[in-house]
Amino acid sequence: MVSKRLASVGRSGIREIFQMAGEGAINLGLGELDFDPPEEVREALKRAVDLGASKYGPTAGLEELREAIASLTSRCTEGIEARNVLITAGATGGLLACYQTLFDPGDEVLVPDPGFVVYGPDAILVGAKAIPYVLHEEREYLPDATEVEALVTPKTKAIVVNSPSNPTGSVLSAKIHKTIVDLAVDRDIWIISDEVYDRFVYGTKHQTFCNAHEKSIVVNSFSKSMGIPGWRIGYLVADGALVEEISKMQYYSLACPPTPIQQAVLMALPHHERFIGEILPILDRRRRLMVRLLNRIPGFSCEMPKGAFYTFPRYDVDIASRKLAEMILGAGVISSPGSAFGGMGESHIRFSYAAPEEDIARGMEIVRSVVEKIG
Ligand SMILES: Cc1ncc(COP(=O)(O)O)c(C=O)c1O
């Protein structure tokens, strides 16, 4: 019934577990904040609707919002203008639009393993091929540039990077960031950098790929940093000529990003910093709590993640991660199996600590009792 391309991709392993969950399960599964978005953002959306922002807008997004994002981005990277910014349907929409714009059938794209669940399937959906590169657990889940370089072939068109990383929480060091930029420049490939967690770093610095190379695209989103994942709004920053091409592509899938949502984000942007400043220390406390409790579970080991809001413990209990996630769900806690994030994710399980401390404490207690029964 469906195309071979669609038939050959699976459903998201994160969603599968989430959809099996019953009422009242403790949610350490989905990648979304438990905090409400700031009041200003909610009020701004109501105002935008009342002001009649209900018409189609430009395919690339509202000019004022593109300008505002350009000027925010210019604080870290000089020379970014509105023409370099495209408003997208979240980072998910931005990533697929990049793939659709850049890849021909047979092109190869290097993707992190373990890595976020869309990088591989998106390649299949556009007829390209995802080639996984390993994030080494023993090296803080960072890639090895020599190994990555060995995967580059004449068909390689791009490398996807994601720092801070989902699911590992790793953050690229300046040194490894440079090796990736050098590699992309030397081998003339695109960098598609997914930076949706750029604001979620703890005691370390985020390294952006914005303007790091003529061929770099930074994909970002307001889902995480404004707490509005259901509003489906994000953006990407790239060379102006490429932005026009991605915009041409975006017309065919989206026509335009949602107008009232863009108006609301624009009005709420001045409150963005404050929101991040309020939630980050809370997330930091939760991060430490979860790691401490995970390391008390027999057979579990978890390094302290430096970014995002996930832990990705390894376990040495003899059970597939999907089965373990199902058993944990049966006991009332939603998690995500490591296998959802690629072959290197097996024997791991992902927990989100964007949840109240009581939920984390109770959730870890439940995981512990499930593991002890298997043990
Ligand atoms: C690394 C990463 N990229 C992209 C996304 C999708 O973000 P959005 O809601 O903006 O589509 C997520 C969501 O969990 C993510 O973790």
Image (cartoon, rainbow, N blue to C red):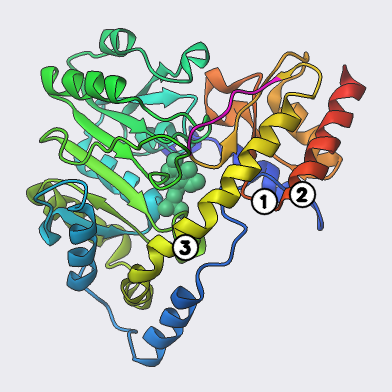
**Helix, strand or loop status at disc 3:** helix
| Magenta stretch bounds | 301-307
Total labels drawn: 3
Mark 1 in CB contact with mark 3 (< 8 angstroms): no
Q: Which residue is the extreme one toward the right?
A: 373
> What residue would you read off at disc 2?
359
Residue situated in front as seen by the camera: 308 or 344: 308
Q: Give the mark toward the camera: 2 or 3.
A: 3
Residue located at (19% from left, 37% from top)? 216
Residue located at (83% from left, 45% from top)? 332
Residue situated in front as seen by the camera: 127 or 183: 183
> What residue would you read off at disc 3?
275
Q: CA distance from mark 2 to mark 3?
A: 22 Å
Residue located at (50% from left, 25% from top)? 114
Circle 2 Cα neighbour tier, 10 Å, few/some/many (<14 / 14–19 / ≥20): some
> Which mark is on residue 355?
1
Q: CA distance from mark 1 to mark 3?
A: 16 Å
Q: Quadrant of residue 44?
A: bottom left
Looking at the image, can residue 93 be seen?
Answer: no
Percent across and percent down for residue 251 are 23, 61
Q: Quadrant of residue 36?
A: bottom right
Percent across and percent down for residue 166 are 49, 36
